Image (tube, helix red, strand yellow):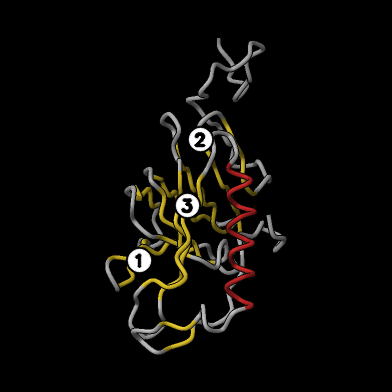
Amino acid sequence: MVTSKGFIPQDKPIPHPDMSFVRMFNDNSVGWQFRGQYVFWTGHVTQADEKHKLLERLDNRVARIEDKNGETVFHKIAADTPFTVENLMGYWITFDSDAMWLDIENSDGQYAALMVGGSADKPGSATVDWPCPKCGLPIAQKTIKINPEAFDRFLSEANEWVQIFNDDPAMRTCKAGDAEHPLSYGTTHEEGEEV
């Protein structure tokens, strides 16, 4: 008779890049994790908390990626598609690589995961911006280079760009739509702390 002990990490070093990632649902750790050429964000909220919601921007329209019946969503975010995750980041981001979004609801609340990368030197760059609240065109775009295994530096640079954006009303104003974007926030942890 074989008894499963769950995931048992191997004693040998993991080859680079790490092509696997295991997260048990009783694992309460949240936030960003860096594994080889992958970047993972994991989050959990209770039923009483605001959910993490994936939004994709298609031209000047926004699509909410969710299942209306609360079923599990596993969604590919194609490279060069602007997206945001509400209650995680206050800006929109466009990677030069694909990403995956996993949204699972159960009696404990919502478990969510965002996975980016997985190929050599990807993501290599990301564009951070905000949509005009009137016309939907992107404003205050900034492309940030992402060095291999330095995604945390990218998060810091994105948060610095958010501060510059917030400090400059002219930067938050769309010339085409003549509307000012409200103040934004950077990438946050589950507890509300900035990365």
Q: Position of residue 127 (x, y in %)?
A: 44, 56
For residue 47, the mark is none
Looking at the image, the residue that sits furthest to the bottom is 178
Which residue position holds label 2? 38
Question: Between marks 2 and 3, how big is the CA–CA gap?
Answer: 21 Å
Residue located 60% across and 25% down the image: 6
Q: Which residue is mark 1?
A: 68
**Separation of marks 3 and 1 at Cα, in angstroms:** 13 Å
Please give left or right for residue 31 compared with residue 66 in the image: right
- Residue at image coords 45%, 71%: 130
Above or below residue 122? Residue 182 is: below
Point out residue 126 in the picture as x, y percentages from the top left corner: 45, 51
Amino acid type shown at disc 2? Tyr
- The residue tagged with tag 2: helix, strand or loop? strand
Q: Toward which corner of the image does residue 177 lie, by quadrant?
A: bottom left
Give the residue number, with chain letter if any, for mark 3: 104
Q: Tell me the SS state at disc 3.
A: strand
